[in-house]
Amino acid sequence: MAEEGYPLIGGRLDYVGQRDVAALVYQRRKHVINVFVWPESSGDVAEARGIREQSLDGYNLIRWPQGDMMFCAVSDVSLGDLRQFAQLFQQ
């Protein structure tokens, strides 16, 4: 996705909400976008049908299921940039 202005700059294993997650780190201009990925559970399926968007403390979040995995992109980029990123990521 570097050609579209979202280069991958790293990754790590992390712990979010009492679960282990993979974290992919992308960049948009001088901003960081973290994408957290974890296996879907039955509670996730009921909670996240389709795409959910949220803003909290200056950060935008977009969460979506894909296959049997859950994805959550978090950043202080504009919501429009994060939506574009999420659409590219899902392709």
Image (cartoon, rainbow, N blue to C red):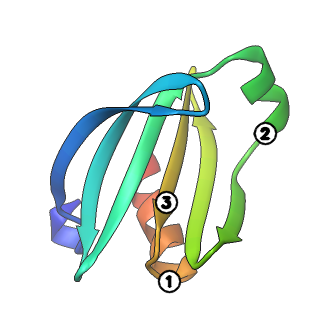
Read off the residue under disc 1.
Answer: 78
Residue 74 - label = 3
Front position in the image: 79 or 66: 79
Front tag of 2 and 3 = 3
Looking at the image, which residue is at 18% across and 63% down?
A: 7
Sequence-wise first label, 2 or 3: 2
Front position in the image: 70 or 58: 58
Read off the residue under disc 2.
Answer: 49
Please state if 24 lies on the left or on the right of 35 as rendered. Answer: left
Q: CA distance from mark 1 to mark 2?
A: 23 Å
Quarter-of-image position of residue 11: top left
Q: Mark 1 Cα within 10 Å, few/some/many (few <14, many 20+)?
A: few
The percent position of residue 63, horizontal first and vertical second, equals 62, 49
> SS class of the residue under badge 1?
loop
Question: Are the residues at dot 2 and dot 3 in contact (C-beta closer than 8 Å)?
Answer: no
The percent position of residue 81, horizontal first and vertical second, equals 45, 78
Please state if 62 lies on the left or on the right of 82 as rendered. Answer: right
Q: Quadrant of the N terminus?
A: bottom left
For badge 3, the amino acid type reads: Val
